[in-house]
Amino acid sequence: MTADELVNLFTDYLRMMDDEATNSLDFLEQVSILLFLKLEDEYRRLTGIRTIPERLDWVSLNSLDGPDLETHYAHVLETLGRQTDATGAMFQKSSNSIRQPSLLRDVIVNLIEAQYWSSMDNAVRGDFFERLLVTAIYRGDSRAGRHYTFRPLVDALVDIMQPRPGDAFCDPACGTGGFMIWAYQYILEHNSILDPDQRQHLRDFAIQGSEIAAKYRRICVVNAMLHGIGNPSRPPRVLLEDSLGSHPGTTYSLVMSNPEFGQKASRPTGISDGGEETAVYRDDFWQTTTNKQLNFVQHIKTILAINGRAAVVLPDNVLFEGGPGEVIRRNLLTECDVHTILRLPTGISFNPGVKANVVFFDRKAASETPWTQDVWYYDLRTNKHFTLKQRPMTRQDLDDFVACYQAADRSKRVESERFKKFTYD
């Protein structure tokens, strides 16, 4: 079956969920859970490796109907969610949002069981799930878009950052997995001579993400698996955690991320001031602040290896906010080479009116003088008007920036109407 046919088939069921008053993202979460169980069943049949216990697996669901299916499915989710291994993490805090047993049976038999997913090309499986994800987000509420980065932007940024086979990649706020998946695909497409060990390392170890919301972590894991990252016995390395809580103890050579916008910390990780805004207290941070994006800037700097590269989507306030914001910017300019800022247009986010930028920086070794010498700004905002439906931004709209960036040799940059250089002063 083609990606088009799969999307059309699944979209029909999204409409049924509307009649059931079930949010489209809740339905996609259930599809992700069921797909994981089906992929594990196919993997077990191919390899003999079982990662989900009998009577909790796909076969146990596929043989039931009616109230028995509903009861057993709830039991499967609860029991697997208590497991302490990587598979159990997939089911943490999960529940059934498909209220009619007959509809749940229909999804299992006519959607998931009807396909042999392991035989599909990764490109077909991945394209199907990405398009279904976009459809579900458009049909859902605006909160869903906070965990989704517009894919033409992801594609352009990955082309600029040029992930390498030896990179240790991390997205500490990975949402639905766009940066992880595009980085993985870029490495495969640009390195056809990888040996089997390199391919296994790339698939199972080199790409890592963290996501604080269990629902989006589940969607991310299955999205990555359908694109070829990981397998049921070793799922993609997507941790269910608040990245800001602590340093992971590991550094990475490449970090790309679009942290969810908002002023407050994701959840209490420090001492609450007044019971509402929560500051993040970490001894490896330059400043204590409740601003989530400023905390992510500090966190990403701490997890970058020396000479590691970062591209981070950040709102305008990070560029001009005073107080802790100014202190953090000064330290970032000193300890890192902040070399490029892309000012993004509105209309490319599911949060209306959001004004965002992509900040590119490289971490450097200790120095008495600031590492940042010049900052290049590319203005993709002035006289640019996009909307999500009537006039969506395409990858071609970013081609000029990609060309101006000069990823192969930034010393060859040339100023233009939209691309200007500013000194450190």
Image (spheres, rainbow, N blue to C red):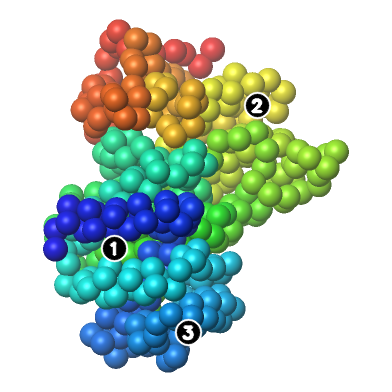
Q: What residue would you read off at disc 2?
A: 325
Q: Residue furthest right?
A: 274
Horizontal arrangement in the rendering, residue 210 relative to residue 39 (left or right): right
Q: Position of residue 283 (x, y in %)?
A: 72, 47
Amino acid residing under circle 1: Leu
From the viewer's perspective, is residue 78 above or below residue 342?
below
Estimate the spatial distance between the alpha carbons at disc 1 and disc 3, rounded to whole Å: 30 Å
From the viewer's perspective, is residue 105 above or below residue 246?
below
Q: Quadrant of the N terminus?
A: bottom left
Crowd tier of the residue under label 3, counting other residues whose Cα lies within 10 Å: few below 14, some 14–19, many 20 or above: few
Estimate the spatial distance between the alpha carbons at disc 2 and disc 1, rounded to whole Å: 40 Å
User: Which element type, helix, strand or loop, lies under badge 1?
Assistant: helix
Q: Quadrant of residue 405?
A: top left
From the viewer's perspective, is residue 392 above or below residue 280?
above
Q: Which mark is residue 177?
A: none
Q: What residue would you read off at disc 3?
A: 68
Crowd tier of the residue under label 2, counting other residues whose Cα lies within 10 Å: few below 14, some 14–19, many 20 or above: some
Crowd tier of the residue under label 1, counting other residues whose Cα lies within 10 Å: few below 14, some 14–19, many 20 or above: many
Q: Earlier in the sequence, mark 3 or mark 2?
A: 3
Q: Position of residue 388 (x, y in %)?
A: 35, 30
The residue that appears at 48% across and 27% down in the rendered structure is 352
The residue that appears at 54% across and 60% down in the rendered structure is 214
User: Which element type, helix, strand or loop, lies under badge 2?
Assistant: helix
Horizontal arrangement in the rendering, residue 338 relative to residue 321 (left or right): left
Horizontal arrangement in the rendering, residue 330 relative to residue 251 (left or right): right
Q: Earlier in the sequence, mark 2 or mark 1?
A: 1
Q: For the residues carrying marks 1 and 3, which lies nearer the camera in this image? A: 3
Mark 2 and 1 residues: CB-CB less than 8 Å, in contact? no
Q: Earlier in the sequence, mark 1 or mark 3?
A: 3
Horizontal arrangement in the rendering, residue 359 relative to residue 42 (left or right): right
